Image: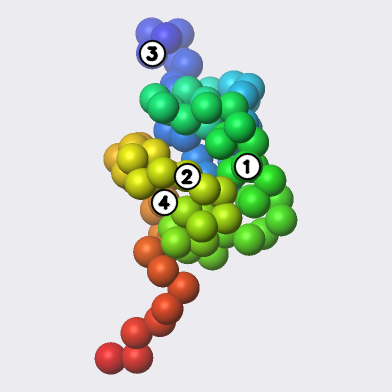
Amino acid sequence: MYARGITLRRVDLWESAATDFLLTPTGILPPFTSVQGLGETAALSIVTLREGQVIKSIEDLMTHSKLSKTIIEVLKVHGCFEGLPETNQFSLF
């Protein structure tokens, strides 16, 4: 793939589709179902929450999509939550 100039991107919380690979200007974007342990139902719930603009933190994603802690950890390892706070609470100090 790399010899032909094709790059594979990471799964992205804001851009990835539930089940389909997407061709983008920066490379091929894998779907949520390509993550080990993440099924089609969970992937569809993430996309639905994203479109409804409900995801403001990792805590929101866990409560609204009913994803397990294991799946959340796998998504963290894949770098899906860059820039997303852990909770909705802000620290003043």
Say which of 63 and 81 sits in front: 63
Q: Is residue 25 visible?
A: no
Q: Are dots 2 and 1 in contact, CB under 8 Å?
A: yes
Residue corresponding to mark 1: 45
| Mark 3 / mark 4, whichever is N-terminal | 3
Q: Nearer the viewer, mark 3 or mark 4?
A: 4
Q: Position of residue 53 (x, y in %)?
A: 67, 59
Q: Is residue 65 in view?
A: yes
**For mark 2, does the 10 Å Cα neighbourhood hold few (<14), some (14 to 19), or many (20 or more) residues?**
some
- The 10 Å Cα crowd at callout 1, few under 14, some 14 to 19, many 20 or more, is some
* Foreground tag (3 vs 1): 1
Could you tell me which quadrant the C terminus lies in? bottom left
Q: Do the residues under discs 2 and 4 have CB atoms within 8 angstroms?
A: no
Amino acid at the residue labelled 3: Tyr
- Local packing at callout 4 (Cα closer than 10 Å; few below 14, some 14-19, many 20+) is some
With 48 as the anchor, is 38 left or right in this view? left
Of the pair 37 and 2, the residue shown nearer to us: 37
